[in-house]
Amino acid sequence: MVGRIWARVKVGPRVRLEAATVVDAPASIVFRFFQQLDHLRLLSAGRRREWCPQQGALLAVGVAQEVRIQQGRHSLLVHFKTLRLEPHRLIEDEFSSWPLKGARRVLALEPQGAQTRVCESNVWDPPWYARGMVEKHEAEQRQFFVAKLNHAKQVIEAVYSVCGADAFLHGVLPDAVRAGLPLMVPLDPPAPA
């Protein structure tokens, strides 16, 4: 499955959104990338942008974080806490704010020689009043999810090819600049319309 990304969505009482790809970099590099929330500024796709307002934030077990999501004219600030953080293997977060309250994200890393298989899964039980909206936007959300993982693969591989084993040691943003990659979300994004 090298270079291919797959996704699956199930809509109903429980939404499960999954995607996977194989990245041409060791699991230690891939983990370093995803542990730093600045990586979100490089992954936005289409009209959806995500970023952590606190630059330099790192995921740590039990630490609450926030991420801003802007999609078209809609803007949302979501809060989550990291439940598990197993270096080079796993990141598990749980969202604590509406509309994603109780949603879980699991990012599993599986070393495959010099490559790493990345599997991301988001599971959410939307409130009954949001289910129609979720179903209506299912295909669009799946496209954003797959595009985001595809961008992560491209960024990690580009930075790894330039920085090698030192990739992301000094931060995601400085290494992305060094590799000539643009920020998808500027450091001071405009306020929502």
Image (cartoon, helix red, strand yellow):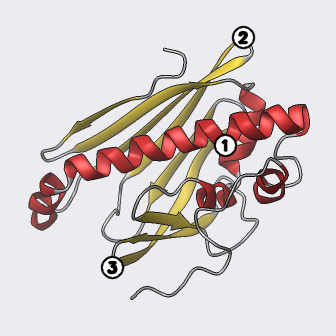
| Of pointers 2 and 1, the one earlier in the residue sequence | 2
Secondary structure under tag 1 reads helix
| Mark 1 neighbour density, 10 Å: few (under 14) some (14–19) many (20 or more) | many
Residue tagged by mark 3? 73
* Three-letter residue code for mark 3: Arg
Residue at the extreme front of the image, as rendered: 180
> Where residue 182 sits in the image (x, y, percent)?
68, 58
Q: Quadrant of the C terminus?
A: bottom left
Q: Could you tell me if the residues under marks 2 and 1 are in contact, i.e. CB atoms within 8 Å?
A: no
Q: Residues under labels 3 and 1: Cα distance?
A: 27 Å
Instruction: Kindly identify which numbered label has been placed on residue 155.
Output: 1
CA distance for labels 2 and 3: 43 Å
Report crowding for label 3: few under 14, some 14 to 19, many 20 or more residues within 10 A (C-alpha): few
Q: Amino acid at mark 2?
A: Gly
Residue 90, image x, y percentages: 60, 35
Give whichever of 109, 174 is nearer the camera.
174
> Under tag 2, what secondary structure?
loop
For discs 2 and 3, the disc positioned in front in the rendered view: 3
Of callouts 3 and 1, the N-terminal one: 3
Res. 137 visible in picture: yes
Q: Which residue is mark 2?
A: 113
Point out residue 67 in the picture as x, y percentages from the top left corner: 53, 68
Give the amino acid type for the residue marked by disc 1 in the picture: Val
Please determine whether, in this image, residue 3 is positioned above or below residue 133.
Answer: above
Few, some or many C-alpha atoms within 10 Å of disc 2 (few <14, some 14-19, many ≥20)?
A: few
Q: Quadrant of residue 166?
A: top right
- Residue 114 is tagged as none
Q: Is residue 87 visible?
A: no
Count the marks.
3
Residue sitting nearer the eye, 95 or 55: 55
Q: Residue at x 74, y 15 (%)?
A: 114
